[in-house]
Amino acid sequence: MKDWSRKDLLSLESLSAAEITYLLRRAALYADDVLARGRRVGHELDGCSIANLFFEDSTRTRSSFSRAARALGATVLDLSAKGSSTSKGETTLDTARNIEAMGVHALVIRHASSGAVEMVAQRVACSVINAGDGRHEHPTQGLLDALTLARNWSAGKSLNIDLRGRRIAIVGDVANSRVARSNIHALTKLGAHVTLVGPPTLCPPALRTLAEKSHSASIDVSADFDAVIDAVDAVMMLRIQFERLDGQVFPSVREYRAGYALTADRAGRMKKDAVVMHPGPINRGLEMDAEVADGTRSVIMNQVSLGVAVRMAVLEACIRAT
Ligand code: NCD
């Protein structure tokens, strides 16, 4: 099999461990150059153009894709729903097809509806990259999180993407989180053990079935953060998806903090070298104390930096496959 032959990146559920590993290794090659703040890193996408089509808000993901595309020589067209013809009633598919007709090589799409990005991918010839669709998946976030952990645990030695023996807690509003879904697939495929933690309304035990059958032993669910915190190598905090809560019973903010916030006290009980992650945006003081977000265990800024490298690898691999 060729290392990579897909024109689209829609989910991590659909990728093999070998495909995930391929993208992470490519990204790792770019990472140091990106961190060195070079304007341009390579010429792999010279003459190409990508379009960001964001039907939902974003800070990091959108600018990260732009930075990634430009670092490899591509030009970037930026479109958001606000200020586009979406507000005049144009359908997502019509918008996507019109932008494709202008000759772009890849559409990077964020959408509030799960499945909308795949729907577009089936109807256009150019590459389509999922930048987050509803509650479904956010594959480049899952990849950048896996790379952040793999690099952290390789510490100076050559990159080891095999995560067997590692334990990661994903904490908070798991039910509504596309970040959690992509991470569950990536991390279990790479061999890690994942514990989902949250109040049963936001983290029901049935979420255990999200991991593929072959990885079902690698995932469990707990409502007791304090019972998990000192046993894991990484804690990934999630933002409560207030915009997607949709009638779910949410404990009061005070209850939520008491049970599930990563407070300085809880962070103090983590294993010596365990790290703290968050995809952003952080609600400081709700799911995580500011001093933890900015503290020595935090790898949150590494996540952001490596996001650019991951998106470079993804854009290059998918566009090359068209
Ligand atoms: C996440 C998202 O949009 O899914 N943000 C991101 O891309 N870094 C997480 C969130 O909004 O909570």
Image (cartoon, grey):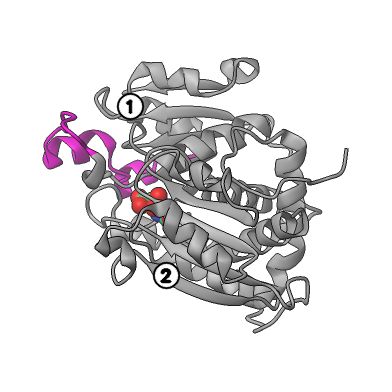
Q: How far apart are labels 1 and 2 at the CA level?
A: 34 Å
Magenta stretch containing residue 299, yes or no?
Answer: no
Q: Nearer the viewer, mark 1 or mark 2?
A: 2
Whether residue 207 is situated above or below residue 316 in the rendered picture: above
Residue at 51 percent of width and 75 percent of height: 77
- Identify the element where label 1 is drawn: loop
Say which of 158 and 207 sits in front: 207
Q: Three-letter amino acid code at disc 1? A: Cys
| Left or right: where 44 falls relative to 289 | right
Residue 272 image point, x, y percent: 53, 44
Magenta stretch containing residue 251, yes or no?
Answer: yes
Q: Which residue is mark 1?
A: 203
Residue 236 image point, x, y percent: 44, 43
* Residue 296 in view here: no
Residue 125 image point, x, y percent: 65, 53
Seen as rendered, the residue at the extreme bottom is 39
Q: Earlier in the sequence, mark 1 or mark 2?
A: 2
Q: Which residue is mark 2?
A: 79
Q: Which image quarter holds the C terminus?
A: bottom right
| Left or right: where 121 falls relative to 176 | right
